[in-house]
């Protein structure tokens, strides 16, 4: 099944649902994640895509978990066009299962702050934040939406990690009652949320995003709006890395030249860019012309 996100509305309710198995596996592969990191990264990337679905074109969003757990920072960038990238600071952390027999994502994240930054293309990005509640990602994003954006929501996220360390299924949803939602609507929603299976189970059983929405909004008159294809995609390139290298001072660039080569690794996607001595010398010459006083 291709990764995709579907938007729908029904009787004063807005819901976005996504299947993200392939892009989560791409993130796992690129960062060589162990299971706890796989679940944390997959949930965060899926959550970022769901939050980004509400943005305008050319905007983007960054979700960042800064906890004191062994995983370190977990970060994802997403766009409304359906592209996402992300990383875990310490992807090869191995933890025992939690008391429920599940991957201990909360223990991996620890206590700290979750922040969401919206880049609108205007002067300054807009950042909201709140304290991490459980570290299990979905509950924390639910809390963020209520505390920072005053939007009552229910967020569900799941990554089923198989014995081969790949994601067997991944997906998520955000469901929000609109201001005109009746008490009857909210009660029916709450009942449906109690009945549904975990998101990763639904995806593993073959449900697509529309199928997940049908479960969430059982008994509602659903209007499906748009479907967006999703993919792991990083904005890095050798040209961007060259631009970054040219911001170094002359001493640091010369040090790389003296080493005979340089390898630069992108945090977000793990892509490695190689620079020969000749390329570094050329960058130094360009940098000196552009910044003669540096």
Image: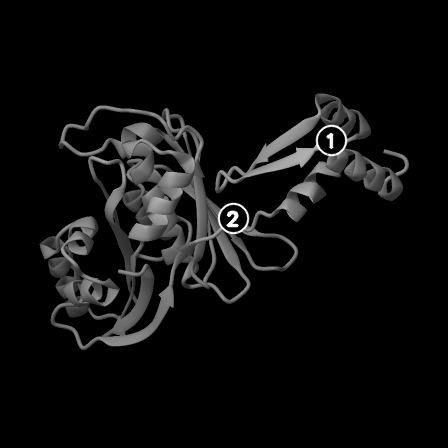
Residue toward you, 1 or 18 = 1
Circle 2 — which element? strand
Answer above or below: position of 150 versus 165.
Answer: below
Residue toward you, 285 or 24 = 285
In the picture of the structure, the residue carrying the numbered disc 1 is 277
Q: Nearer the viewer, mark 1 or mark 2?
A: 1
Q: Quadrant of the C terminus?
A: top right
Task: Please rate how many residues cluster around mark 2, counting C-alpha atoms within 10 Å: few if below 14, some from 14 to 19, many from 20.
Answer: some
- Residue 104 percent across, percent down from the top left: 24, 31
Residue toward you, 31 or 60 = 31
- Residue 248 percent across, percent down from the top left: 74, 33
Residue lying at 21% horizontally and 24% vertically, measured from the top left: 96
Answer above or below: position of 60 versus 183.
Answer: above
In which quarter of the view is residue 31 placed?
top left
* Residue 155 visible somewhere in the drawing: no
Tell which circle, 1 or 2, labels the residue nearer the N-terminal end. 2
In the picture of the structure, the residue carrying the numbered disc 2 is 127
Horizontal side of residue 273 vs 21, given as left or right: right
* Residue 291 visible somewhere in the drawing: yes
């Amino acid at each position: 099944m291709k990764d995709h996100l579907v938007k729908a509305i029904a009787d004063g309710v807005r819901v976005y649902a996504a299947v993200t198995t392939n892009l989560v596996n791409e993130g796992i592969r690129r960062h060589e994640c162990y299971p706890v990191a796989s679940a944390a990264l997959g949930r965060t990337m899926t959550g970022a895509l769901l939050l980004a679905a509400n943005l305008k074109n050319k905007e983007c969003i960054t979700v960042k978990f800064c906890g004191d757990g062994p995983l370190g920072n977990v970060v994802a960038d997403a766009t409304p066009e359906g592209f996402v990238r992300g990383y875990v600071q310490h992807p090869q952390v191995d933890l025992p299962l939690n008391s429920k027999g599940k991957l201990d994502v909360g223990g991996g994240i620890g206590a700290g702050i979750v922040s969401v930054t919206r880049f609108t293309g205007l002067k300054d990005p807009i950042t909201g934040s709140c304290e991490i509640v459980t570290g299990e990602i979905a509950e924390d994003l639910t809390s963020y939406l209520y505390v920072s954006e005053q939007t009552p929501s229910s967020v569900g996220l799941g990554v089923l990690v198989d014995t081969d360390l790949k994601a067997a299924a991944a997906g998520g949803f955000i469901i929000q009652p609109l201001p005109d939602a009746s008490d009857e609507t909210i009660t029916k929603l709450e009942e449906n949320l109690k009945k549904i299976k975990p998101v990763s189970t639904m995806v593993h059983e073959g449900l697509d995003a529309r199928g997940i929405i049908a479960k969430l909004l059982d008994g509602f008159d659903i209007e499906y709006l748009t479907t967006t294809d999703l993919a792991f995609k990083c904005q890095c390139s050798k040209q961007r890395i060259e631009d970054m290298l040219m911001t170094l001072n002359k001493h640091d660039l010369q040090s790389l030249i003296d080493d005979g080569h340089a390898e630069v690794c992108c945090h977000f996607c793990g892509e490695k860019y190689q620079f020969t001595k000749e390329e570094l010398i050329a960058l130094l010459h360009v940098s000196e012309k552009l910044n003669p006083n540096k």
